[in-house]
Image: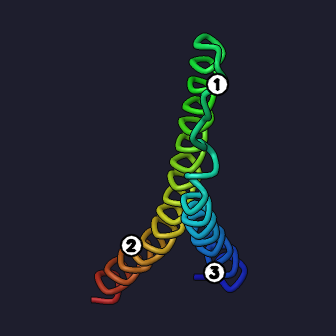
Amino acid sequence: MADRLKATVEHIDDAGRGFHREALHLGEFKHLASPPTPGVGDAALSSALLRLSEAFGIGHELLTNLVTKHGGNLRAAASDYRNQDIDTRKILDDLMGKVSK
């Protein structure tokens, strides 16, 4: 693999690991995204606050999952580039071996 491509693939893999770290960090704060809601004396308002808190929790979970997914996609892309380079080299070696015979 060419040095410039190798550096780029390593950066892609590092970015994927960074996304995974951030997703774990986001997951640590799940309890803050959907805090318990106190009763405020008005049933309709209490219900609305509860639904709003649940919506924030769902949004936080969706964001965490999205960051995790994109991190996985980046790592998979880096792996695919590495495997492609290995496969291409193997094909070239096989062809050169047949030509020299």
The residue nearer to you, when weighing 85 against 71, is: 71
Q: Are marks 1 and 3 in contact (CB under 8 Å)?
A: no
Q: Secondary structure at mark 3?
A: helix
Q: Which residue is mark 2?
A: 87
Q: Which mark is residue 49?
A: 1
Q: For this view, does 63 lie left or right of residue 89? A: right
Q: For this view, does 101 lie left or right of residue 62? A: left
Q: Quadrant of residue 10?
A: bottom right
Dot 1, how many residues are within 10 Å of its Cα: few (below 14), some (14-19), or many (20+)? some
Report how many numbered discs are placed on residues in the image.
3
Where 62 sits versus 2, above or below?
A: above
Q: Position of residue 37 (x, y in %)?
A: 60, 35
Tell me how far mark 2 sits from mark 3, CA to CA.
15 Å
Q: Which residue is mark 3?
A: 6
Q: Position of residue 6 (x, y in %)?
A: 63, 81
Coloring scheme of the render? rainbow
- From the image, state whether disc 2 or disc 3 is nearer to you: 3
Please name the residue shown 51% across and 48% down the image: 65
Amino acid at pointer 2: Asp
Q: Are marks 1 and 2 in contact (CB under 8 Å)?
A: no
Q: Quadrant of residue 38?
A: top right
Question: Which quarter of the rendering shows the N terminus?
Answer: bottom right
